[in-house]
Every structure is written in C-alpha cells, then in structure tokens.
Amino acid sequence: MRSPRGGVGVGRAQEHVELIPGIPDDVAVDCLARVPHASHRALRRVCRGWRSAAAAPSFASARAAAGANEDLVYLLQFGNPSAADDGPKDGGDAPANTPAYGVAVYNVTTGEWRRERGAPPVVPVFAQCAAVGTRVAVLGGWDPRTFEPVADVHVLDAATGEWRRGAPMRSARSFFACAEAGGKIYVAGGHDKHKNALKTAEAYDAGADAWDPLPDMSEERDECDGMATVAGDRFLAVSGYRTARQGGFERDAEWFDPAARAWRRLERVRAPPSAAHVVVRGRVWCIEGNAVMEWMGTRRGWREVGPYPPGLKAGTARAVCVGGGEKVVVTGALDGEGGGGRHALWVFDVKTKNWTVVRPPPEFAGFVFSVASVRI
C-alpha cells in the first residue's frame, strides 16, 4: 500500500511504503520495537522498510520508551569438557558445537543463553572484550596454534548481529587491562610474546576504527584489571606485576587523564589479588572472599556494600555492571563438591543487595575469562 506521506523511505523519492499496512508508522515502529532481540535478524529480513526502521537511531529510543530494552552479557568462555556427556550431540547450541574458546551470550532480561552467530571461527585464547554503545570488541589474546600474543581485533554490532574485522592493536598483547571509558576502548599493560610485562597503552575508537597510541604508564603491569571510573570518562589500570616480580601483584593503580594525556597514580587501591573489580555508578567495587566492597578513596579505603555471592569459589570471579548500574553480573566456579568444575552466574540487585544464582546449561558452564555488557 502506497501513500504520499513521509516516513521511512524505500523505493522512489516521493513514495512511501507503510511499515504495516493500515497502521500509522509511529504505531508500527512501536510494535517493531517490542520484538525480542533474539528475533531481530529475522525482523530485518522481512522487508527493506523494517530493516531501515530497525537501523534508525530512533529505534533504540522507541525500545526504551516501550520498556523493551534487554541487557545482554557477552562472555569469552572456554568450552565445558563435561558438556559432551550432559546433552544431545546435535542442534544449534548443542555441546558438540561448543568451541574451545568462543563467544556466548546471556540475556539478563529473559534468562536465555545462546552462542553468538557469526563470531570469528577461531577466537584467540584469553582474548579480552569490551563494549562501547552497541559495539562489542574482542581484542588480543593468544594464537591457539603458536600460543603467542596477537594484535587482532574483531567488532560485533550487537544491534544488527554483524561482525567485522577491526584495525589491529599497535602492540600484540595478552592478559592486559581493557575497558571502555569516554566512548573509547582502552588497553594497557599485559605481556608480549617473550612474557615481558608491558607498560604501553592505546585507545580504540570503534566508530572510526582507529587506534590512538597513549603515553606509557609509569611502570609495567602484567595481568592488570581495567575499568572506567568517576563519570565513566577515565580509564583505570589496577594492580598487575612487573616482569621481575612474576605474580607479585601491586596494590596501586594508574588512571589516564585524557585532557592532560598523562597517567596519574592511585595508591592502595588493589583489593586481594583474587578479587574481581567492577565499576558501579562511578564507584570501584570488588568481589572478594568475604563481601562486596566499595572503594571510598585513599583516606577512607574500602567499605562493605553487600554480601559475597553464595557458592562462588574464591579467585575465579569476573564481573560486569549491567542496566546502567542496576545490576552486577559475576561469573565464576561453583564451590564445594557439587560444583564439579562447572561455572555459574550470580546476578546482584544493587537496590535490594540480593544475589540470584543462575546455573547455565552444561554447554555454557565453562570458565569465563572476559565479560562485557550491552543494552539493546
């Protein structure tokens, strides 16, 4: 059905095709905005009008207005060896199809699990991931054949499900700090192919697909944690160790000042080496052996803000904030005899201070090395 009205343009310049015949386009967009994210690939294939509507910047606003937003957690995860004995051998996400190290997705809103389609056939082992907007970048790690660090970058647009190869990092590295801050993805530290700790750093603009080399940190930091803090515009590299002090984690940190293009030191930030760090509403949190703690500054130190995740094995946690600070998702190994080497998720409600334990299907119960979250 054609009409002279303006709207989502398809076909000739002066013609308009209604998104849903007989329904005003604003109402149609509201209907399309309520389609679950898992069906967006199919939605885009229906017609050019729907594809254009879903690609428009206003579509995200329509989903938010309709209360249809979904929080997705992307996990770079090792396969679970026991999964082959726990399920069928065929099907889209069956245990037999679980990669040695790949990209899994947990939908916090719906509770669904899936394997990310279109991901690189071979994801570098111990690669890191970070998200900016709806883009998820998979960076660095080890070549699974040579076990040497790589500079590879792969970028997923979570809104469309499309992957592309990104500009490589200027330095191959693994076990580095990585996080989004101020609309860019920062990487710092880690180690090179000779296992030498690095103090180099760089920032990635996912929109421009370009890297900005940053000044070196004041010292080498292997196996450091990365996060954004304060107003979300500052990148923080926490702890790590020097080449000469393998495993001797420092208790300080450095944050990058983008205005001065210089690194600043923070003392006594590091919690116990086994702790997982995450930023919640501008505050650094850590999940360690007794509680969830919040960093209150050099003078005041740490304060308890919540209980420890029940059943989480110490030293195995990774954490990410979702929903703009409404929840924290923690991954890690199940403690005790019932764990059987399997991993689970714990979802912390920041308002109620309560944990919910999520036991994934066997094929998604492997060790998670890196996590990132996106709101669609």
Image (tube, rainbow, N blue to C red):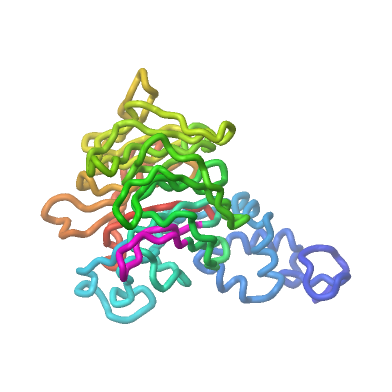
Between residue 119 and residue 360, name the one nearer to us: 119
Q: Is residue 144 magenta?
A: yes
User: Residue pushed farthest bottom?
Assistant: 90
Q: Magenta residues?
A: 136-152
If the image is split into quadrants, where does the C terminus sit? Answer: bottom right
What residue is shown at x 34% (from left), y 51% (from top)?
Answer: 191
Please say whether residue 360 is visible from this viewpoint: yes
What residue is shown at x 55% (from left), y 71% (from top)?
Answer: 41
Position above or below: 11 against 217? below
User: Residue pushed farthest left?
Assistant: 337
What residue is shown at x 43% (from left), y 52% (from top)?
Answer: 372
Query: Residue 164's quadrant in the figure?
Result: bottom right
Report the magenta stretch's main SS: loop
Query: Residue 24's quadrant in the figure?
Result: bottom right
Q: Tell me if 140 is positioned left or right of 335 in this view.
A: right
Q: Tell me if 43 is positioned left or right of 312 in this view.
A: right
Between residue 221 and residue 304, name the one nearer to us: 221
Residue 14 coordinates in the image, percent (x, y)? 88, 70
Query: Residue 240's quadrant in the figure?
Result: top left
What residue is shown at x 36% (from left), y 28% (from top)?
Answer: 295
Residue 272 coordinates in the image, percent (x, y)? 25, 35
Residue 335 coordinates in the image, percent (x, y)? 17, 50
If the image is split into quadrants, where does the N terminus sit? Answer: bottom right
Residue 239 coordinates in the image, percent (x, y)? 33, 37
Q: Tell me if 209 is positioned left or right of 48 in this view.
A: left
